[in-house]
Image (cartoon, rainbow, N blue to C red):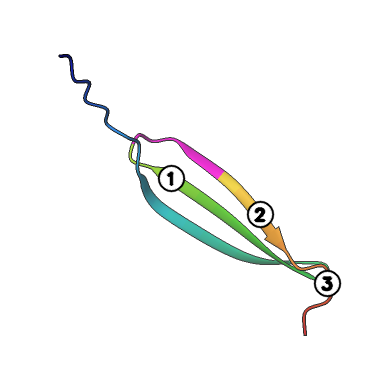
Amino acid sequence: MVFLEIDAMKISDVKVYPTWVGTRNQLIVKVETDEGIYGWGESGLSGREQ
């Protein structure tokens, strides 16, 4: 029987950058992995926040 050992990539850090664009709140997020790969994401409110 053959067993394969798989080392899964793991998230090593999440950095959050709150910003203000015009009249809207924006949130920029950078997700980093232990293998040096990273990605960016964004979130925002559409004017209904109180």
What residue sits 48% from the left and 48% below the top? 31
Q: Which residue is mark 2?
A: 42
What residue sits 52% from the left and 50% below the top? 30
Q: Is residue 21 left or right of residue 27?
A: right
Position of 14 relative to 49 (above/below): above
Mark toward the viewer: 2 or 3: 2
Precedes in sequence: disc 1 or disc 3? 3
Q: Which residues are magenta?
A: 35-39
Q: Which residue is mark 3?
A: 23
What residue sits 15% from the left and 14% below the top? 1
Q: CA distance from mark 2 to mark 3?
A: 16 Å
Observer-nearest of 5 and 10: 5
Q: Check the picture and name the quadrant holding the C terminus.
A: bottom right
- The residue positioned farthest toward the bottom in the image shown: 50
Q: Quadrant of residue 8?
A: top left
Report the amino acid beneath label 1.
Glu
- The residue positioned farthest toward the left in the image shown: 1
Observer-nearest of 49 and 21: 49
The picture places residue 35, in percent across and down from the top left corner, at 35, 34
Position of 29 relative to 7 (above/below): below
Report the amino acid beneath label 3.
Thr
Q: CA distance from mark 2 to mark 1?
A: 15 Å
Check disc 2 and report its element: helix, strand or loop.
strand
Precedes in sequence: disc 2 or disc 1? 1
What residue sits 62% from the left and 50% below the top? 41
Observer-nearest of 4 and 47: 4
Check disc 1 and report its element: helix, strand or loop.
strand
> Which label belongs to residue 32?
1
Q: Quadrant of residue 48?
A: bottom right
